[in-house]
Amino acid sequence: MQNRNVEVAIVGAGTAGMTAYRAALKHTDNLLVIESDAYGTTCARVGCMPSKLLIAAAEISHQVERAGQFGIEVGTRRVNGRQVMQRVRDERDRFVNAVLEDVAEWPEAHKLKGQARFMGPHELLVDGQIRVTAERIVLAVGSRPAVPEAWQVLGDRLLISNDLFNWQQLPASVAVVGTGVIGLELGQALARLGVDTRLFGVNNSFGPVSDPAVREVLAQQLATELNLAGDAPVEKVARSDDGVILTCRDSGKLREVEVDYLLAATGRRSNLDSVDLAAAGVSLDDRGMPAFNDATGQIEDSHLFIAGDASSAHPLLHEAADDGRIAGDNAGRFPDIRVHPRRTPLTIVFSDPQIMLTGRSHGELTRSHCRFATGEVRFEGQGRSRVLGRNTGILRVYGEHGSGQFLGAEMFGPAAEHIGHLLAWSVQQRLTVQQMLDFPYYHPVIEEGVRTALRRLNRALQMGPVPVKDCLDCGPGA
């Protein structure tokens, strides 16, 4: 058996693992990255980038469809599914290759392909053939789609998002089970590209939204466009001659739906179970997760660190990169552990309208019994949004009683990806609502709607001047 001895071993070469490698390399050149699958990130290969490519095609198709609203005749809309998927694959491969080029520059001595499993606190066995002894270990093993075992009976008619991006052609019909981020984004995109799409959720839960008012507006709007059953748990699936028969319970009654494919968007689970972490002497909870410090990446009080989707704490690319930087730095400098403050939470869902959460969510604030107030704006009458024909949605902003500090926001509406950044920066700078109102607002822009919500929040906080006129950005004095 071959033996390797290193200071730092990093298990996984996705976003978190690659960032951990670069951070640990600043402290030692005696390290090793172990990868069981293809090098590269979930984001580039089967996540953020290919999904946004599909969404971009869907948005163009939707714009053409609604051109008549502006008095523009564009003829018959026809979606060439083969060309749509060709562009998705071509651009996806370009993003993946950029990542692979980065890994190719690493010294060969720093790379090892194979499945690693713990044999002891400091020992990893790779593919049963190579024993790696490491002083410190970073676990960046990522996550995988969580699919009910009973659904495997569907064979090749059961899809996960990874499969979708290898399609040569768009299918005629799909059932998307799950109304989280992946389900909402892909379900709406497929529907706008002409696929007969049925979307099934549970408890009318949509993505990360926790504010009941935002959830209500979102559900109403999605129902106008999508074949949506927001509370229809799937009880049984079966393979048919031509596809899939899905049985769900909708409004208390059993309903059968037959489609070509079932796309499981039922969440993800950590790959930690693949490394037998318990063999390292670590205690695991009932979900198979260890206790770890979010600000250091350290598992318990040990030489082990965790980063990225493996922890299930921050399933977002920019958070995974931060996790990797923190864990890699501390593994490299161990035992000199440093605390790294986390950035303000920011989540964006690329539905249309988009969904955004930043800072502390409504649910989090409610559970913490924080004394907070809420300001709101709806976009039906917001000037710039009406000009663009994108006047749908709601923004809810939260502030703390007493201090007037801005705490966070939830939104379903136009330009949420951009507004989310502005509000996240405000939370991170610990600005008060009044300070945010003192910034300039051009006219006419969607951000004037943000100002309206902030004014109403300031009034609810009983802070700042009372505006003479509270309109929806009707002019410079609004």
Image (cartoon, helix red, strand yellow):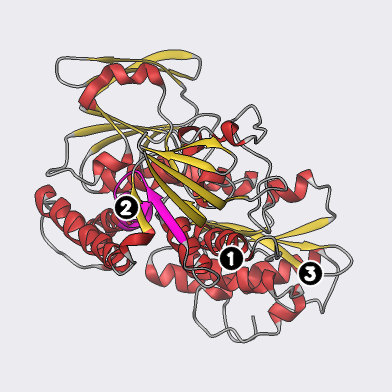
Q: Position of residue 293 (x, y in %)?
A: 69, 51
Whether residue 61 is in magenta: the answer is: no
Task: Indicate the amino acid at tag 2.
Answer: Ser
- Labelled disc at residue 405: 3
- Labelled disc at residue 329: 1
Instruction: Answer with left or right where residue 242 lies relative to residue 389.
Output: left
Badge 2: residue crowd in 10 Å (few <14, some 14–19, many ≥20): many
Q: Position of residue 377 (x, y in %)?
A: 61, 62
Q: Which residue is at a point 64% across and 60% down the rendered structure image?
A: 409
Residue placed under numbered mark 2 in the picture: 51
Stretch in magenta = 31-49
Q: Position of residue 301 (x, y in %)?
A: 73, 48
- Labelled disc at residue 253: none
User: SS class of the residue under badge 3?
Assistant: loop
| Residue 178 in view of the camera | yes
User: SS class of the residue under badge 1?
Assistant: helix
- The residues tagged by marks 1 and 2 sit, at their Cα atoms, a distance apart of 31 Å
Give the quarter of the image for residue 90.
bottom left
Give the quarter of the image for residue 172.
top left
Q: Which residue is at a point 55% across and 61% down the rendered structure image?
A: 328
- The residues tagged by marks 3 and 1 sit, at their Cα atoms, a distance apart of 33 Å
Quadrant showing the N terminus = top left
